Image (spheres, rainbow, N blue to C red):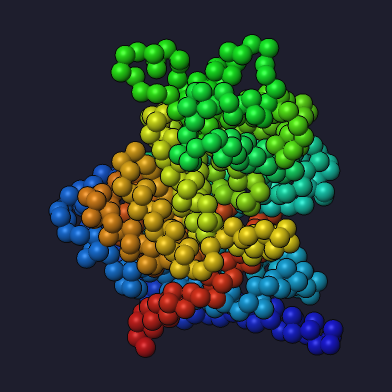
Amino acid sequence: KSMKWKTRIVIVICILVLAGRQAVAVRDMFGTHARRGASMLAGAGNLCARSGKSMKWKSTMTAAFGNVTAAKLVDFNDAEIAFRNKSTPELVRNFLILKVCSFPIIVKNSEILLNTSYKVLGQKITNKLVKETFFAQFCGAEDEAGLKPVMRKLEDAGISGILDYAAEGDLEEEQTTERENQVAVRTYSYENEKVCEAATRVFEQCIRTARNVAEAGGNRELPFAAIKLTALGNPILLKRMSEMIVETRNLFQRMEDKLDRPTVGSLSLEEWRLAYRNYFVEPENPLEIDNMFFQALGKSKEEFEAPGAPEPRLDIVDWSRSMNMEIIAKLIQGCKKEGRLKSASLNEEELKLARNLFARLSKIAKLAGELDVSLMVDAEHCYFQPCIDANVLMLQREYNKDKATIYNTYQCYLKSTSERLDQDLERSKREGWVFAAKLVRGAYMVHERKLAKAQGIPSPIHETLQDTHDSYNGSLDIMLQAPQAHVMIGSHNQETCEFATEKMAEYGISPSSTRVFFGQLLGMADQLTYILGANHYNAYKYLPYGKVEEVLPYLIRRAQENSGLMAGAVHERNLLKNEIKRRIGL
């Protein structure tokens, strides 16, 4: 059986090699046709050349269309428009790659296939094969120089890029100084703080690359970069910080539940004093209790003493807003008894590491602000997310005062997302800064459900796919209606894109509005991205980049995370197939 399985693996590898050769053969066979088509497109392109002024061009085109609704303008089934910027060989490669990725057995065993290919074909041939196929499909380039022509080509189609240095690796292998600068930015095991500092430098270079590409005319006027917080601090620490934040929020609910009155969602000053004394030791100076109340409100006591001033009340939005690591640690020290809250508190060493984490994050955000690059902080597993949210909130207060620099990510398959989004949006209104969010459906569903089952707790994931769709569309609708909110619509779902364009038209939001963006992964859902770009929406491709051998773990993980999506991309493959047939006259 073992030999039979190995034989099958080798056969699959051979099929992939033949697929690569077939793409080359098609390129040679239809090269003349492709060049002729490219020439025709170039001629058409000259009629509406933008000379690097895409934003101005988009505004002009939008004005020309007047009040025509977006729903009538956008046809996501027009394969000719969707693929007009791609050559026939590229379409053949896209079709073959997506077809291969539609087989779960290949995706599930992709790492085994890769290692077997290294043994059978050798590292050099395998890496070249991957570079010409899967890497070319899903990754932007190996370095900044390679990204510039990729971005210019996307720009010709009205599309920009979100840069993400996607190298991954096992930090246990990175012991030497020579390996230090190749540290991965998406790894979950750490040896020391030097690793996190190296990841910080990687992110800083990613931001500089985004700006350099933009200045070269290949990323419009609104460059984006993406980072992951687990690269900047020990994941165990991030989990501990999240537990402390969650318990502190739960404390507020318990405080109100203990009061002899119906729940109203807020505490008066007198109720706060009573609730505080139920849980914490009386401070030497009783005024400290009142000071904490007004500190949480973000207002002075004097503001409520003026004639006609409303009664001060503390709600969960103000409470969670004010709870940074230092305040929480000080509060917990006064707990009357041992419990979940006190056990979740950080010790001095952990507080120091938490400060280091935020210092790195602030350094990255400061650079993004100085270079005018929007920074998207990726969502991660549920047990990291409260810590991520708290840190991103502090950055948004600092760097989103006048523009949308820092974006947080909301996974709409989580039951808690709607409430979180409402609270964060309300907080931005109260504090007067620009709210910016990326909406996605989510990438860790299997893991989250498995973990919840193991812990004997309810799953944080919506029970049905339709519930997730409803959550996504509901959250998107809220964002589009909020004039101070900026949103990146991260979706490969055609119905979602149709919903978004229809709502934008309904709310009078121009396709070229700089507060609404659409994003899809490179190599996937081209019929959405390219048609959005052709219709003058802010369309983006998520562009991972890095050396082939460093990015391979990323490619494998992405393929496995999106296996269901790739297997279900029947419509996209059909559009590709029909366009290939149309071009060759079949």
- At 77% from the left edge and 69% from the top edge, which residue is drawn? 115
- Give 299 or 236, whichever is nearer the viewer: 299
Quadrant of the snapshot with the C terminus? bottom left
Query: On the picture, is 504 further left or further right than 141?
Result: left
Task: Give residue 449's quadrant in the image.
Answer: bottom right
- Give 120 or 260, whichever is nearer the viewer: 260
The relative height of residue 484 versus residue 555 in the rendered view (above or below) is above
- Give 50 or 378, whichever is nearer the viewer: 378
Could you tell me if residue 219 is visible in this image? no
Q: Position of residue 251 (x, y in %)?
A: 61, 37
Q: Which residue lies furthest to the front in this view?
A: 260
Q: Where is residue 282 in the image (x, y as percent from the top left)?
A: 67, 19
- At 50% from the left edge and 37% from the top edge, which residue is drawn? 261
Could you tell me if residue 354 is visible in this image? yes
Query: On the picture, is 116 further left or further right than 378?
Result: right
Q: Position of residue 116 (x, y in %)?
A: 78, 73
- At 84% from the left edge and 87% from the top edge, which residue is drawn? 1
Q: Position of residue 92 (x, y in %)?
A: 48, 76
Q: How many marks?
A: 0
- Give 104 or 372, whichever is nearer the viewer: 104
